[in-house]
Amino acid sequence: MNYKVRYLWRQFLDQTGYFSKHNLTPLLFYAIGLVFLLGAMTFMGPEGIIRYLYTIVGLMGAVWLFSMVVLNRNATFYKDSVVKVSYVPLYFRMLPTVIFQTFIFVMFTVLYSAFTALVVDDWLIDIFSLLYYTVLGVILIIPFILLFLTVETPNLGKVNVAVFTVLVLVVPVLYLPESIPAVLENILSLNPFYYVVNGLQANAVQLAWNIDRLPHDILFFSQTAFLYLWMLGFYSKMKFNLYQYSKKRQDA
């Protein structure tokens, strides 16, 4: 176990050292969001800032989820990648990127609320709810990371753009849930990504987890359980396909 802990710690610290252009791209997005929030504070009232906070947390939540998928693929197929290290399980190799990206996302989410508190009285996010939805986001994204590692296409860049666009459209970033028809909102709320992102947004505007969300909790955990049952059956085959794909890239 000690070698796994050392590996995890070393790879976490190395996130800003290798492949930094990609690893730090989400950090740039988070920083731009903070700059715009500071700018909005100069000409918006409290209600406008809260609306902006809701939107920016949703958008950065989508960036966070998407970055964990894409950056794990980049790290896996990077030259001299740890994918060649046989004593480190594949699922463990994903953790440094997941932990690093989650750390900077949570840090900036707290900063967004902290700066909002400068102009809105008695403003404080619920740390428990923030961590709750963050952990659920990590649990949800792992099967999709594994799935994306097996994608083989020459147009991966276009696929990435398309996937991110769809992700932003199906979570409440460009709209408020109450501003769309109830039927459409009910359909969108069936999406587990909607549950995570909207939970982070609601917490950012001081609507922490409550019993009213219990049906959505049950739905989310049922969907996640199904995903992990699928992943258990897919994992062994995926490891073989990943090895074959890596070998093909090295021979090319």
Image: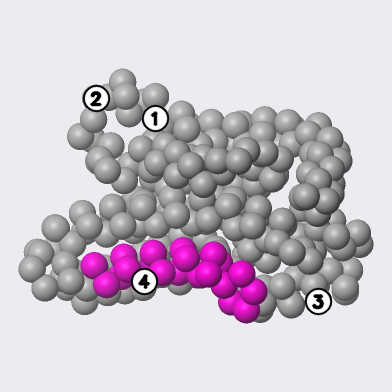
Label 3: element kind: helix
**Is residue 33 rendered to the left or right of residue 18?**
left
Asked if residue 244 lies left or right of residue 136, the reply is: right
**Where, quadrant-wise, is the N terminus in this rendering?**
bottom right
Identity, as a three-letter code, of the amino acid under mark 1 = Leu
Mark 2 surroundings: few (<14), some (14-19) or many (≥20) residues within 10 A: few
Residues at circles 3 and 2 in contact by the CB criterion of under 8 Å? no
Residue 243 placement (x, y as % from top left): 84, 47
Q: Which residue is at the front of the view, 67 or 100?
A: 67
* Mark 2–mark 1 CB contact (< 8 Å): no
Q: Report the residue marked by disc 1.
A: 188
What residue is pinned by disc 3? 6
Name the residue at 91% across, 62% down. Answer: 87
Disc 2 to disc 4, C-alpha distance? 33 Å
| Residue type at tag 2 | Pro
Magenta stretch bounds: 16-36
Q: Residues within 10 Å of mark 1 (few under 14, many from 20)?
A: some
Residue 200: image location, x then y, percent: 41, 53
Looking at the image, residue 107 sits to the left or right of residue 45; the answer is: right
Mark 4: few/some/many CA within 10 Å (<14, 14-19, 20+): few
In the rendered structure, does residue 223 fall within the stretch colored magenta? no
Give the amino acid at mark 3: Arg
Of callouts 1 and 4, the N-terminal one:
4
